[in-house]
Amino acid sequence: MPEAVGVIQTVGFPAILAAADAVVKAARVTLVQFELAERGEFLIAFRGPVSEVQRAMEAGIEAGSKVYGGVIQSHYIVPNPPPNVVDVLPIRYTEKSEPYRF
């Protein structure tokens, strides 16, 4: 089954926390990356079946936007990323994320 990777970047920690919570509760996806970007921006990456990533993305954007002062800086979905992208970028399943994989 083809998998996708979704990424959401927010301004401020509360917005990314709300987005991450909504993402994993809304669909069968696994959070594979959390990172502090620049200037107080945070990002999460999550993987799963394409349709599930789309559903999770919608929920994450909505939840992050509802947080007081929450700003969704950017978001993107890559359906079926090629192996070289998975190998180079930090979007691979790790020992930490593997137990939560669907």
Image (cartoon, helix red, strand yellow):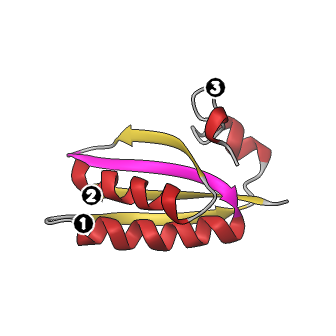
| Magenta span | 39-49
Q: Main secondary structure of the magenta part?
A: strand
Residue 25 position, x and y percent, is: 50, 59
Q: What kind of element bears circle 1?
A: strand
Label 1 vs label 2: CA separation?
Answer: 7 Å
**Residue 8 in picture, x, y percent from top left:** 43, 59
> Of 76 and 58, which appears nearest the observer?
58
Task: Using a 10 Å C-alpha cutoff, classify the residue at mark 2 as few (fewer than 14 neighbours), some (14 to 19) or many (20 or more).
Answer: many
Would residue 68 be found to the left or right of residue 55 on screen? Answer: left
Mark 2 or 3 closer to N-term?
Answer: 2
Residue sitting at 24 percent across and 48 percent down?
Answer: 13
Query: Measured along the vertical axis of the image, is residue 55 above or below residue 18?
Result: below
Mark 3 vs mark 1, CA separation in Å? 31 Å
Circles 1 and 2: CB atoms closer than 8 Å: yes
Q: As drawn, which residue projects farthest toward the top?
A: 95
Residue 5, compared with residue 86, is above or below; it is below
Numbered label attached to residue 95: 3
**Looking at the picture, which amino acid does disc 1 mark?**
Val
Which residue is found at the position 37% from the left and 56% from the top? 9
Quick check: can you spot residue 12?
A: no
Report the residue at 42% width, 61% height from top. Answer: 22
Quickly name the residue at label 2.
Answer: 15
The quarter holding residue 74 reads bottom left
Q: Which residue is mark 1?
A: 71
Q: Is residue 98 magenta?
A: no
Q: Does residue 54 sit above or below 49 in this rendering?
A: below
Residue 95 x/y as whole percent: 63, 25
Give the residue at x 64% y 62%: 78
